[in-house]
Image (spheres, rainbow, N blue to C red):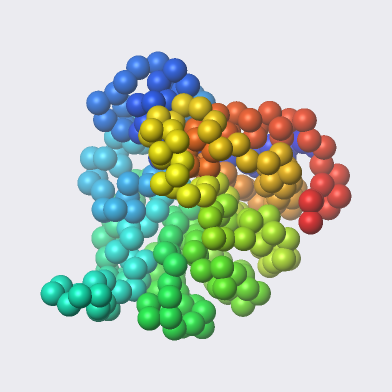
Amino acid sequence: MMNSLQQHIRWGTCSWNYPSWVGVVYTSLQPRAAGYLREYAQHFDTAEIDSWFYRIPERDEVAEYLAQVPEGFRFTCKAPRELTVPTLRARGASGSEAPNPSFLSDERFARFLEVIEPMLPRLDAIMFEFEYLNRQRMPSLTAFLDALDRFTTSLRARFGQLPFAIETRNRNFLTESFFRFLLEHKLLPVFSEKIYMPHAYEVYALYRELVQSDAVIRLLGGDRGAIEEKTGMQWNAIIDPKPAEEKRAILSMAMDLAARGHAVTINVNNHYEGSAPLTIEDLKARLSGMQYSGDSALPF
């Protein structure tokens, strides 16, 4: 049974353009990010495209990424952050913020979708990563879900079913109402292992029955500045190893999702332990030694 469960779990990293992975993943330096993808795809099932969070890409970039990977390779990507930030700092006004006209904008998302359209058959999730939203930016969970409802309902009407995935950095948003909303709107949950957030497996344990779709697990890590200082931005060694119990809990969560018939994408960031490829190597070795026998494998 384990082999069949593992087939439902895809492994990848949060971005891949790291010269310090030469000797770990790559055999040589490449001048551009796309140049690494062909060799990357020999090691991993999927890749998270982080750069589109900062800008809508060019069509040539999308085509170039697709040309580098085999047919069965999958991607996840972030929607541009201009769509997920409700307010912007007002010009000339110290500390004040003004509404962001692109926040959950149908037209800006349509522009993004038009550019990435050739990749849609390969995308397991288009992730909307929302920063921590204080009350000035978003007064309540209800207001947040109302905004998402308007946005996703409009997009479904225009573009049909697409793999929209929602990631919140507000721990107080992780409630039954939130997960019921995702279920009813056919939105994929993104579970993040990240500083200031509850463990992904703890959240999953609370709302497991409301998770009835594919899911993304992002292992993002703790204090970014601290681990960047420790590594010197050289991401080729485990610097901050996570406890074995934590890793087992994450793997048990992934196995449970897979056993329930859902595809699971696990995207690992260098900031999680110091080297995303080495973290994946360790997790896969641990997974091969685990036994799954229904709920008994869950650490909750």
Foreground residue among 216 and 238: 238
The part of the image, by quadrant, that contains residue 1 is top right
| Quadrant of the image occupied by residue 59 | top left
The residue positioned 73% from the left and 44% from the top of the image is 245
Quadrant in which the C terminus appears? bottom right
Give the residue at x 65% y 34%.
283
Q: Is residue 44 left or right of residue 290?
A: left
Taking the image as shown, residue 82 lies to the left or right of residue 148, namely: left
Q: Position of residue 215 (x, y in %)?
A: 59, 54
Residue at 40% x, 21% y is 22
Q: Is residue 80 left or right of residue 91?
A: right
Along the line of sight, the residue nearer the viewer: 126 or 192: 192
Query: In the rendered image of this protein, does residue 39 appear above or below residue 169?
Result: above
How many numbered circles are shown?
0
Against 199, residue 231 (above or below) is above
- In the image, 74 versus 196, the foreground residue is 196
Residue situated furthest left in the rendering: 92
Q: Quarter-wise, where is residue 290 in the image? A: top right
Residue 150, given in percent of the width and then of the height, sits at 42, 79
> Does residue 159 show up?
yes
Q: Position of residue 263 (x, y in %)?
A: 62, 48
What residue is at 26 percent from the left and 60 percent from the top?
111
List x then y, in percent, for residue 192: 55, 55
Q: Can residue 75 be seen from the camera position used here? A: no
- Residue situated in front as seen by the camera: 251 or 235: 235
